Amino acid sequence: MPPAGSLRLATYNVEWFNALFTDNGRLREDRGPSARHKISRAEQLGALGIVFTALDADGIMVIEAPDTGTRRSTVRALENFGRAFGLRTSRCVHGYNSETEQEIAFLYDPARLTPRHDPRGNQLTLGAVDGTPSPRFDGAFRYDLDTDLSPELIRFSKPPLELEIELAGGGVLRVIGVHAKSKAPHGANGAAELMRLSIDNRRKQLAQCIWIRRRVEEHLARGESLIVMGDFNDGPGLDEFERLFGHSGVEIVLGSDAPRPLRLTEPHAAMALQSRVAMAPTSARFWHGPTKHYFEALLDFVMVSPDLAARNPDWRIWHPFNDPGVSAVPELREALLQASDHFPVTIDLPLAPPRKGSGEGAKVNGQS
């Protein structure tokens, strides 16, 4: 349960959630194979039911949510999922459609939250230049990727979900759900072209993060309480391209080089920045076929504006091995391993700022 007087929000990338539903949004609880290796659809759905129930969140940003198209509906599928497992997060809001079968959606408890899709931006399709408001996330962002003085138009294949959320007890939050992803270098002929395409795709991902950062700064300039959450497929020290470009996309969105009033706070990212090769948290676990080993990475984040950070929130990665509270519950530990290749990240946000003298500082898994 969330602590009394707190709001619990989560971000959770569910690997190919779409494959678990029929076109009319019914759960495919059968023995057919899911997209998870050697796990049936019924097993993955059961595991997800356990995880969502254990999270007991007021709102969950679902990354890789079921598809919306001519016959399929993200909202219908996720609300059916919520009813099937008796979740209090029984309602769903969805924003722009994705070009892929992986949507961004928000499951929520209607007794606690009233969210609405509230996109910001100055234009629908034209890009922005320095000094102008950032465009809508379903449009295009004009940015010079390769410093040739000719800006390219950057688009999201998975446009971020922008929400205005009214809290039951009063107050408003702005929340941006993100699934940033650079395309794999398919079709490359030889090592040189592979490297060129990889660098080009990484540039595009960083430009997407610059676009998100512009929106963040606009919210902060208006004094709005802001949370940016989701899967960035990127993080401090994650790959060799960070040396080439100087910063990860996560650092760009956080505003690591900005004045303190314009920085977002995310303690897991801060730990990774401070300790590139030693102690660092992880939120995803992947099987690497060529080496026959699992590898882990920190890809999922919940970033908050300075006013929310001052409330002393508590962040937690629900890791099946690294979180003692999770690993002590065998059913939950196994469910997390079956449900997805990512693990949920939650934040318990006090609904009121702390009293003077009570101390400040971000907490990770209950530790200051």
Image (spheres, rainbow, N blue to C red):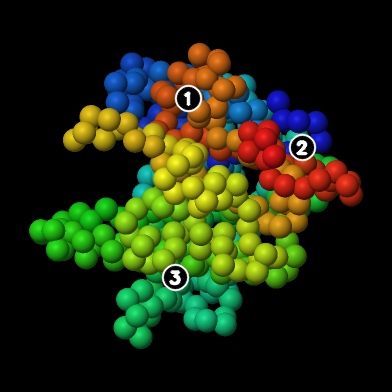
C-alpha gap between disc 1 and disc 3: 41 Å
**Residue 86: x and y, percent?**
62, 21
Q: Nearer the viewer, residue 243 or 36?
A: 243
The amino acid pointed to by label 3 is Ala
Please say if 212 is above or below 57.
below
Q: Residue at x 69, y 39 (%)?
A: 368
Q: Residues within 10 Å of mark 1 (few under 14, many from 20)?
A: few
Question: Where does residue 103 sit, x and y in percent of width and height?
Answer: 45, 46
* Secondary structure type for disc 1: loop
Q: Residue furthest top?
A: 330
Specify which label sits upstream in the sequence, 1 or 3.
Answer: 3
Bin the neighbour count of mark 2 within 10 Å (Cα to Cα): few under 14, some 14-19, many 20 and up. Answer: some
Q: CA distance from mark 2 to mark 1?
A: 26 Å
Tell me which numbered mark, 3 or 2, is placed earlier along the sequence: 2
Residue bearing the label numbered 1 = 321
Q: Is residue 60 visible?
A: no
Q: Which residue is mark 3?
A: 140
> Are the residues tagged 1 and 3 within 8 Å (C-beta)?
no
> Residue 268: x and y, percent?
55, 45
At label 2, the amino acid type is Ser
- For label 3, the SS is loop
